[in-house]
């Protein structure tokens, strides 16, 4: 129906999360209507971010350089780590201004049905970090079945001397941290609970 170049643009846009074929088509035609000086900066920004942005060597957050801005901040408390699934989950937590420690990005959640096993996540790196002066690990995985399973799995691996907590109530079950408001997340952080399974007597 369209030229190969337009079809390719629509196909590539449709691969983005939340973008269906119709939305991709509307975006493509919107881009075609823009002047070169309006659309080329977008293309340049995409190329630049792919060339310059990688993962932090310590926490695996997005970083321009070896360490991300949070790990580079000497004012942060290095003895407390907040574990999240994706870099996008850090943003809403930072907006609460309730957390002043460091982060650890897993890169997803355990989901055997989808082929995501412990070896596919950065769990081993987290356990290694927990053995070097960490006093508390806050498990802030999403309140979904996979997020809860991931939190329980990690809690059993961490050293006994480390306090392991989970975000408190306030986050809706089945929701994502990315869409939580600051007040809800702030209450969840301040009222976090122990995440370890109670030992049998």
Image (cartoon, rainbow, N blue to C red):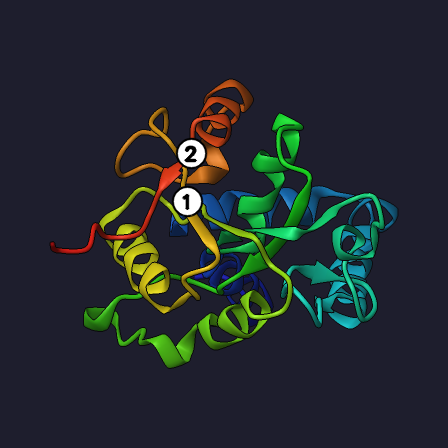
Label 2 with label 1: CB-CB less than 8 Å: yes
Query: Is residue 183 at least partly visible in the picture?
Result: yes
| 4, above or below 141, in the image | below
The correct choice, above or below, for 124 with respect to 107 in the image is below
Q: Where is residue 91 in the image (x, y as percent from the top left)?
A: 62, 40
Q: Where is residue 152 in the image (x, y as percent from the top left)?
A: 28, 57
Identify the mark nearer the N-term, 2 or 1: 1
Residue 46: % across, % down:
73, 60
Q: Is residue 91 left or right of residue 189?
A: right
Residue farthest left in this picture: 201
Q: Position of residue 77 (x, y in %)?
A: 72, 46
Give residue 194's quadrant in the image.
top left
Label 1's element?
Answer: strand
Q: How crowded is mark 2: few (under 14 residues within 10 Å), some or many (20 or more)?
A: some
Q: Which residue is at 27% across, 76% downward?
A: 115
Residue appearing at x 45%, y 38% in the figure: 177
Label 2, on which residue?
Answer: 192
Residue topped by disc 1: 165
Q: Quadrant of residue 9?
A: bottom right
**In terms of depth relative to the viewer, which is nearer, 113 or 184?**
184
Q: Any mark on residue 33, and which? A: none
Residue most extreme to the front: 201
């Amino acid at each position: 129906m369209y030229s190969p170049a337009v079809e390719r643009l629509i196909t590539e846009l449709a691969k983005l999360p939340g973008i269906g074929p119709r939305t991709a088509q509307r975006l493509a035609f919107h881009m075609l209507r823009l002047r070169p000086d309006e659309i080329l900066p977008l293309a340049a920004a995409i190329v630049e971010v792919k060339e310059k942005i990688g993962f932090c060597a310590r926490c695996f957050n997005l970083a321009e350089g070896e360490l991300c801005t949070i790990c580079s901040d000497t004012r942060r408390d290095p003895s407390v780590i907040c574990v999240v699934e994706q870099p996008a989950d850090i943003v809403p937590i930072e907006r609460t201004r309730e957390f002043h420690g460091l982060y650890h990005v897993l890169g997803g959640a355990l989901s055997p049905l989808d082929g995501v096993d412990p070896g596919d996540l950065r769990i081993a790196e987290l356990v290694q970090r927990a053995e070097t002066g960490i006093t508390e690990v806050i498990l802030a995985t999403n309140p979904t079945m996979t997020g809860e399973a991931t939190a329980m799995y990690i809690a059993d691996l961490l050293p006994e001397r480390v306090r392991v907590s989970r975000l408190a109530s306030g986050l809706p079950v089945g929701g994502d941290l990315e869409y939580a408001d600051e007040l809800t997340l702030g209450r969840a952080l301040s009222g976090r609970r122990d995440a370890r399974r109670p030992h049998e007597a």
